[in-house]
Image: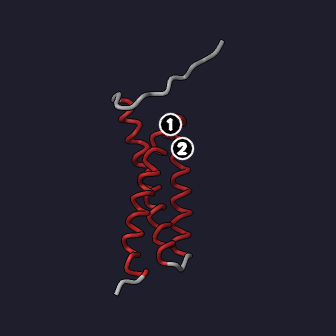
Amino acid sequence: MLTIDSFLGISIGICSFLIIGLLHPIVIKGEYYFGTKIWPLFLIGGVFCIICSIIIKSIIISSLFGVFGFSLFWSILELFQQKKRVEKGWFPKKENKKFN
């Protein structure tokens, strides 16, 4: 017999997919506008989410905080890889325009 708990794994999987999909453009836009100097924000956010994951008793919410936290940690690596992709010309580089 199917219960709400039967769909717990698929729910976490769908949310994980959405979290990763959300962070992908954030990394690209973040590197474009701010460069790699924003990596500490991803680190702080990741640590915060992992702490929340440990504290929260609900399995699904705790799992989602854990997924989001480790996805933020992974985004640090992606941020620096994005910089290399920009240097290779695969993504546009932000031009600093100076007005006189």
Which residue appears at 53% of the width and 41% of the height?
A: 37
Q: Is residue 32 left or right of residue 91?
A: right
Q: Is residue 11 above or below residue 59?
A: above
Label 2 Cα neighbours within 10 Å, binned few <14 / some 14-19 / many ≥20? some
Q: Is residue 79 left or right of residue 49?
A: left
Mark 2 sits on what residue? 38
Q: Is residue 15 above or below residue 100?
A: below
Which residue appears at 51% of the width and 47% of the height?
A: 39
The type of residue carrying mark 2 is Ile
Figure disc tally = 2
Label 1 Cα neighbours within 10 Å, binned few <14 / some 14-19 / many ≥20? some
Helix, strand or loop at label 1? It is helix
Q: Position of residue 94 (x, y in %)?
A: 49, 27
Mark 1 sits on what residue? 35
Q: Is residue 40 above or below residue 61?
A: above
Which residue appears at 35% of the width and 27% of the height?
A: 89
The type of residue carrying mark 1 is Gly
Pick the quarter of the image with the N terminus.
bottom left
Q: Is residue 49 above or below residue 59?
A: above
